[in-house]
Amino acid sequence: MSLRFRTTLLVIAAIVVVLGTATLVIDIRVDNEVAQRADTNLLERAQALADIFTTQISTSPQRFPSYWIPSFLGDDGTVYFRIDCRGQQVVSSDAAAALAWPVPAPGQSTALTDMTDLQGTDLRAIALRFSPDASIAVDPGPVKDHAAATPECMLGLAVDRSEVLDFQQSMDRIEFGCVVLGFLVVAVLTPLLVSRSLLPLSGLAKAMEKIGPDTPSVRLASTNIRELAPLIARFNEVLSRMEEGLLRERQFASGVAHELRTPLAELRTAIEVEMRYPSGRDAHELLADIGQIGAKMEHIVTALLLLTRIEAGIEQLSLQRVDVSALTQALVERHRHRLQERALDLVAQIDPGITWMADSTLLDVVLGNLLNNAFAYAPSGSTVELRCMARDWSVTNPAPDLTDEDIARMQQRFWRKGKEAGVHTGLGLALAVSAARAQSLQLELTLRDGYLQASVIS
């Protein structure tokens, strides 16, 4: 089910229920109002007839003529009336005696009911108790009960109510016609209005179709539609994260391809040369050379993976108190062989008991890569200075070939200048910068008088 059809169906159903209920309530109210007004009119006519009867017997000794119908009762409809006093009939119209007249309940003066005459005409009848002011001439006879001895009179009046019924039915037809017309208008306009209101979604879908792996930088345009604005914002955030992930993936693949090309070529050349021109070298020595090449490739892949994980925020930090003094001593011992190989002189000033709030693994990456970079690129036989203070850790080495422009490029991936020493990928500084940033540490590179100083400030 489409969103357009579902919304249209729900809107139409809601309007049908609301409009139908409202029409039903209005119809009931109109019918009740018309019936109440008709009953009020009938009551007024009955009271007028009772007043005429009272006035006539008070001013004239003649009996009230049974054949006379007052002018206000002489309409085109059927009218029946009768007056009984002291339990005896005083006056009655033709066939009035055959009707089932209502009787007021004790304590009430009026009673209303619907009835039909012998011809099947729908009538509305009222019974009214009233007391005339003068004696009433009635036929003599014995008084049968106490009620008959009372001076009260009972007036019955029944009129044709077909006009009221016709008016109510006309109103019902008008209301029903209006409801049906309203339903038709709603059924026609609602799909059009819903389709128009959903046009931004169609535009959004078309804009999304243009976004793919070949266009990772494309974003959805912002909108002032309140419901779509947060959706577009979240979608653009997802696109940004996907673009970052895609760029990291491409960067990782490019880095691996760039860095593994040389060791793979070395490995293939060594194997092909040994197969074509056997050197007679010991197998252990040959496998050791191949193992060094493999270790170099493993180091490259490990460094790239760690750098990618840090930049992506995947590497989880575990900040704790780290003994920087002990870590620095361990790093020096780890790189002791490099010092001996390159005849470097290390001048170390390591204050004891220095601790930082950091991640021990990533801090090892930062300090280890800076120390390894200094030992790898310092000229053979030169002096490297190492300082480990309370808030500042630094390593300084001679760098006669570097310029101020090189300092800005040193933090880039795979940047190297001059002859590389040992297993060096050009990723050390880039990895150290990313790891330091992840721990909110400040890493600075400074070139003064031919000396490169790498400082980490807590």
Image: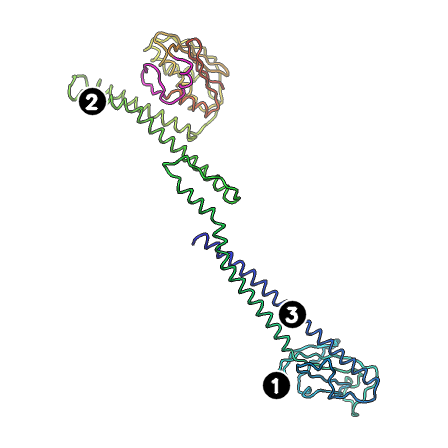
Q: How is the image coloured?
A: rainbow
| Vertical order, 112 against 237 (above or below) | below
* Nearer to the camera, 55 or 335: 55
Label 2: which residue? 271
Tell me the quarter of the picture where residue 120 sits: bottom right
Label 3: which residue? 32
Whichever of callouts 2 and 1 sits on the residue coming sooner in the sequence is 1
Whichever of callouts 1 and 3 sits on the residue coming sooner in the sequence is 3
Q: Secondary structure at mark 3?
A: helix
Q: Residues within 10 Å of mark 3 (few under 14, many from 20)?
A: few
Q: Amino acid at mark 3?
A: Asn
* Nearer to the camera, 159 or 180: 180
Q: Which residues are magenta?
A: 402-426
> Is the stretch drawn in magenta largely helix, strand or loop?
loop
Give the alpha-carbon distance from disc 2 to disc 3, as whole Å. Answer: 107 Å
Q: Is residue 343 left or right of residue 112?
A: left
Q: Amino acid at mark 2?
A: Ile
Give the label, 2 or 3, closer to the camera: 3
